[in-house]
Image (spheres, grey):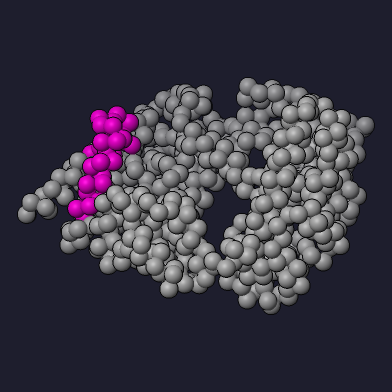
Amino acid sequence: MNEIETKIKTLRDELEQHNYNYYVLSTPTISDYEFDIKLKELQVLEGANPEYADPTSPTQRVGSDLSKEFEQVAHKYPMLSLGNTYSENEVRDFYTRTMRLLNEPFDIVGELKYDGTSISLIYEQGRLVRAITRGDGTRGDDVTANVKTIRSIPLKLRGNDYPDVFEIRGEILLPWAEFDRLNKAREEQEEPLFANPRNAASGTLKQQNPVIVASRKLDAYFYYLLGENLPGQGHYENLEYARSWGFKVPDVIRKCHTLDEVFAYLSYWNVERKNLPVATDGVVLKVNSLLQQKNLGFTSKSPRWAIAYKFQAEQAVTRLNSVSFQVGRTGAVTPVANLEPVLLSGTTVKRASLHNADIIEGLDLHIGDNVCVEKGGEIIPKIVGVDKDARSMMMGDKVRFIKNCPECGTPLYRPEGEAAHYCPNESGCPPQIKGKIEHFVTRRAMNINIGPETVEDLYEADYVKNAADLYTLTIPDLLSLDRWAEKSAQNLMDSLEQSKTVPFERVLFALGIRYVGETVAKRLAFAFRDINNLQQATLESMTDVDEIGERIAQSVLNYFADERNKTVINRLKEYGLQTSIDETVLADRSEKLKGSTIVISGTFTKHSRDEYKAMIEQHGGKNSGSVSGKTDYILAGENMGPAKLEKAAKLGVKIINEDEFLNMLKK
Ligand code: IVH
């Protein structure tokens, strides 16, 4: 081994040890900063010496942004499910059945049942070669690139007593803290929230972009080793081996010799699980001896040597007082149960989601029913059952899904294949109108300085019924409302005035046309240049624009077909909002960079990074954050990152400086 190779190997070993200390043992021994320095050093060396590339190097964990569809692969051993039990009696049945079938002493291993998404990892010669999702149990998606970003999963194993080839199965989880953080960020971005960590974990694993996966901080716990030459005779022993190879095997697993020990394990975790950093929904009990497992065998769906005991989701019984129907900003109608307040897992519950018409029908719900509310992994409690025996002669009315919008009276519709009902009256239904105004004023749209509460007040006071009305507000109007003073009123006036300079593409986005997000608005604005042109555009002329499909085009047509929308637009024009592309910007636009992907790196003297970014887009190019096979140029300033430099060299990407870039635009 030469000097460079040795250096690379030492760095890889060191970094992998630090990963293990941090993510598996939770006892880091160096700072994040020191870690990053070493990682960068390794990246540079690997970039400059591609002959020593290794898919299991710690540098492979950051993900590349090359998107790809997942490949479907067959499982060598099918991924089965477990039989579920819900009571100690059923557990006792499992135990006695096992005793009868085996007719000899046996041990049971107790483990927690982690509530995430299952994964099967294949290792060959101590290296992770493939990660496959459960899929339909027989075939799953190859998500190796995504799984490599999970720092607690070893890419290379420790020790040397592992089989040449084996599989290990476990659960990929998003810890509660990360789940909360992710949902908070999504709320701020007005993106839909994940209902529970399980959905978040499986959604993340199916992301096409491993960089996003890497940012979500998934974790993985392992509970099942499979292969021809496993080191131990028992499941428990094999998991201990797996732990020694670097896997995160929970240390809460227990070998139980008697049924009483099993019960003790169940009751302990029934309570203690609330203190864990990840979601669990039960305990899994497995016969320890592999030989005994083999003798017990499998049914078509699940092993006879294991069962799951599901924790009771916390439930309470209370009276259903009424059902209300809420209309959201998109017009979706959600039924909500109003309950007699009841204490459930430490909080008072007064309302529960009923989801949709099918759920209400399935429960055969009547007003006054005693209903069972459950707080599972979901954020909002749900109704899971009705005590029909408790119904008296005085039974209340059957709950029926409404036919008309409770806010505006318009008949509701239910799109084919969807469970939800919608109010179609987009521009006349109060919550939808308020939602649209709230969107109109957001920072990325018109950036007008008011929040949802003010929108509500202005709407209720009849001052603002659509976006255009904002521009007719006067200081006396505002002063007539609660909480307004001269200064705040003036601020809003200034903010409205300022919004008249917001460029057309953002105005178009602000209108809140369904499916017209920021990017689509930009494309349409630059393609049609003026709102009049867009108003006259046909389906064909719109779908001719890059990345504009029929669904979007149809939505734009529908929007402009509505007279009320036309009036709003005419008024906005009249008040001086930008309804065409700024000529000076337009004059500077070109397609000189069309088809080029450019990465910006380093610091510049003539323009800021943001300005260069805008220039790239203005001239039809694409700005990307990381160097890949698709990169055409790197616009490099001072102090360009060494990792990028090396990668560029390796991939043969052309590096240009500020002047060269500006010259390209002059040509
Ligand atoms: S063992 C053949 N152990 O539960 C048995 N599964 O219903 C293989 N799960 O798909 C599974 N924690 O996603 C096993 N400690 C644990 C588990 C566990 C969670 C999940 C797993 C599996 C499902 C089975």
Q: Is 158 rendered above or below residue 251?
A: below
Viewer can see residue 518: yes
Direction right: furthest residue = 394
For image coordinates 91% across by 50% down, the residue present is: 409
Q: Position of residue 468 (x, y in %)?
A: 81, 50
In this image, 299 relative to 581: left or right?
left
Q: Position of residue 556 (x, y in %)?
A: 73, 65
In this image, 666 relative to 62: left or right?
right
Q: Quick one: 218 or 546, which is closer to the camera? A: 546
Q: Position of residue 527 (x, y in %)?
A: 63, 70
In reply to whether residue 589 is colored magenta, the answer given is no
Quadrant location of the N terminus? bottom left
Q: Quick one: 463 or 475, which is closer to the camera? A: 475
Look at the magenta stretch and give its main secondary structure: helix
Q: Is 450 rendered above or below residue 512?
A: above
In this image, 455 relative to 642: left or right?
right
Q: Position of residue 278 (x, y in %)?
A: 47, 34
For image coordinates 61% across by 56% down, the residue present is: 518
Q: Which residues are magenta?
A: 17-46
Viewer can see residue 515: no
